[in-house]
Image (cartoon, helix red, strand yellow):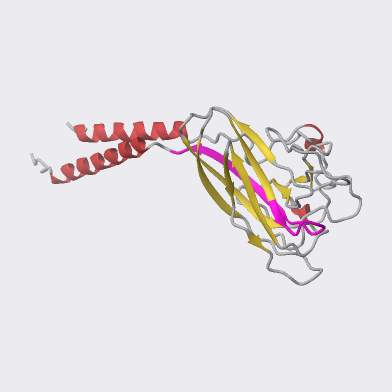
Amino acid sequence: MNRFPLATAVASFGILSALAGRAEADPNLVQNGNFTETTGALSTLNTTTFSGGEIDDNYIYSGDLTDWSSPNTTPPPANYQLAYNLYFFGLANDKTTNADARYTENGQFLNTNFTGSSPAGAPFVGLDGDPNFTGPLEQTISGLTVGQTYQLSFYWAGGELADRTNFDTVQLTGSFGSSTFATPVYTNTNTTPGTPGSFSGWMLETFDFTAAATSETLSFLAVGTPASNLPPFALLDGVSLTAVPEPSTWAMMLVGFCGLGYAAYRRRRTPIAIT
């Protein structure tokens, strides 16, 4: 009769318990982190006519990006709208067709140096880095555990719209509750006057935070130079916030794997009875 070693049973139980705890901690707490869900007028746009739409509080698609908002937090200066953030469907016309229906001239799409959608897949958003138009993209995250560590991850890229040239720098900044974060600064490598600025390519960033409340606001804000006429864009996709497993979980998994190794060792050394 084959006997299942006690050590193997204990080890298996330890691993399964640890994995179960990990599974409970892993779900993404960010809703619509890949920006695939839209409502209202934004969801009815013809994707051959538009490459996306403006999603801040200044235009008709405000609130149409499900679970996200892009508010004007302070009164805009004279002759300016404070926020200018765009939603892109992530299709071939990202570089040929306007994403803002108010403009009849071309240029409200990504420049020719843009090389493709993010690793998270289509679609994605673009946040204006011009301080005169800066507005956040944010979401309130609920169901947090006070004192628990959470890891924020997202893809971002630096570039510009087709009607702008020669931006200098761009980065994506933000906050989770009272904590702040910032990506590295991307510097435009194409400095030839009047030509499209370079595209950084998509980059993955991760940051760890400790929750101070059961509900915190996650906010993204583009920062770039120069401030007037030539602002850059920071693109964003694949936003995720997951709980970091406690050290006790990792310890349980280690004990479990050690137990399995020992059980396998014992079985190799057990003589085979010949009858």
Where's residue 113, x and y in %? 73, 63
Where's residue 21, x and y in %? 40, 31
Q: In the image, is 153 to the left or to the right of 237? A: left
Q: Is residue 120 magenta?
A: no
Main SS of the magenta part reads strand
Residue sitting nearer the eye, 69 or 4: 69
Q: In the image, is 132 to the left or to the right of 26? A: right
Q: Is residue 229 magenta?
A: yes
Where's residue 256, x and y in %? 28, 38
Q: Quadrant of residue 232?
A: bottom right
Q: In the image, is 261 to the left or to the right of 57? A: left
* Part of the protein shown in magenta: 223-244
Relative height, residue 13 to residue 181 (above, below): above
Q: Residue furthest right?
A: 104
Residue sitting nearer the eye, 44 or 154: 154
Residue sitting nearer the eye, 130 or 28: 130
The residue under the point 77% across, 40% down is 56
